[in-house]
Amino acid sequence: MPVNILFAARADQWRIYQAPLTKALLEQGVDATLSTDLAPEDVDYIIYAPDSAVQDFTPYTRAKAVLNLWAGVENIVGNPTLRIPLARMVDHGLTQGMVEWVTGHVLRHHLGMDRHILGQDGEWRADAPPLASDRRVTVLGLGALGEACARMLVRLGFPVTGWSRRPKDIPGVSCLSGDAGLQAALKAADILVLLLPLTDETENLLNAETLALLPQGAVIVNPGRGPLIDDDALLVALDRGHVAHATLDVFRVEPLPAEHPFWAHPNVTVTPHIASETRSETAAQVIAENVRRGETGEPFLHLVDRENGY
C-alpha cells in the first residue's frame, strides 16, 4: 500500500517541490502518494512549512512525523496539537549556501572591502588589512550551520571562538558554553556571527549589556534570526561607534519596513533574508530519507528537542 504524504505548504512551493520530491522518493524505494489534498485520517507523513494553512494537527491520527521544510522551527515547535515527531531541515545545500554567505561577509569586513568599493573618489588608500590570524571571529550557535561556518573560517586562518548552550568539541575552534562562556566569546569577537536558533533564552541575546562586551569597533553579521538582537540597543551601539558595522540578513518584521532606521543607517548593510535558502532538490533528498527511515523502523534524522525548542 502506498505511503500517503501530505504537502502542507504554499501553492507556489508545491510547484517547486513536486518533481524533486517524487524523484527522491522513487530513488529511496518509497511507494508514495504525494498530494496537497488528502483526508487527514489517511496521512502518514506531513511535509510542512510553518506558514501552511495546517495549524491543527489533531485530525492527523495516523501520521508518523512532521517533516519541516525550513531550518527554523520556532513557529511550530510550541504548537500544542503537535504530538508526533518533528524533524527540522538540515540540508547540505542550505548549509553550503550559509557557509558561502557568512564567509563572504566576514572576509568583506576583515579586508575592509567597502572602503575601496565605495570610496572611488581619487584618494589612494594604501592601508593593508591584518592577516586573518590577527582577526578574531566568534560564532554564536554551533549547530549544523554554525559548525560548518566555524570550520570554514578556521581553514581560512581566523582564530575562531564558538559558543553554544551545551558543550561542543570542534577541531580548531575554541568552544565555550554557559553564561561565563558567552561573556568570554563576546569579548573575543572582532567579528561576531550569529547563528543561534530563536528561543525564549536567545531572544534579545544581543542587548545593551552584551553589546558592551564586544571590543571597540566590532562588526556584527547576523544571518540567524532577527529577534536575537535588540534593534534599539544595536542602533545606540552603532551611533556611538562601539559597533563599527552590522550586516543583517534577518529581522523581526520581514520584509523590513521601508521606514525602519536600519535602511538609512550608514553603518548597516541590509540583505533580504538571502543568506541561505532551502534548495528543493537537496531538501527533497533529506525528506525522502526520513520517510524511508520511518517505513523501515529506523530513527528519524534531525529530530527537534521540544524542551530546548530546536
Image: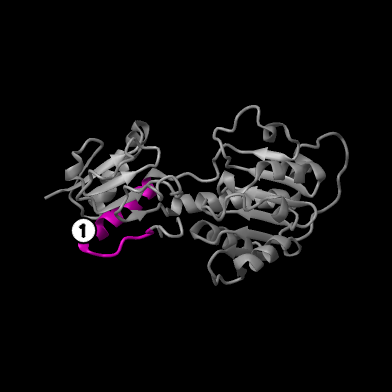
Magenta span of residues: 281-303
**How far from the left and from the top, in percent, is residue 183?**
69, 63
**120 on left or right of 219:** right
Q: Is residue 163 visible?
A: yes
Q: Amino acid at mark 1?
A: Glu
**How far from the left and from the top, in percent, is residue 29?**
21, 55
Instruction: Inspect the magenta stretch and tell me whether residue 227 lies in it.
Output: no
- Residue closest to the eye, 250 or 118: 250
Which of the 4 image quarters holds residue 140? Answer: bottom right
Q: Residue furthest front?
A: 80
> Where, quadrant-wise, is the C terminus in this rendering?
bottom left
* Residue at 29% from the left image edge and 49% from the top image edge: 24
**How far from the left and from the top, in percent, is residue 298?**
26, 65
**How far from the left and from the top, in percent, is residue 80?**
35, 48
Q: Residue furthest right?
A: 123
Residue 292 vertical placement versus 184 (above, below): above
Q: Which residue is mark 1?
A: 295
Secondary structure of the residue carrying tag 1 is helix
Residue 260 vertical placement versus 153 (above, below): above
Instruction: Inspect the magenta stretch and tell me whether residue 283 lies in it.
Output: yes
**132 on left or right of 19:** right
Number of marks in the rendered image: 1
* Residue at 42% from the left image edge and 53% from the top image edge: 91
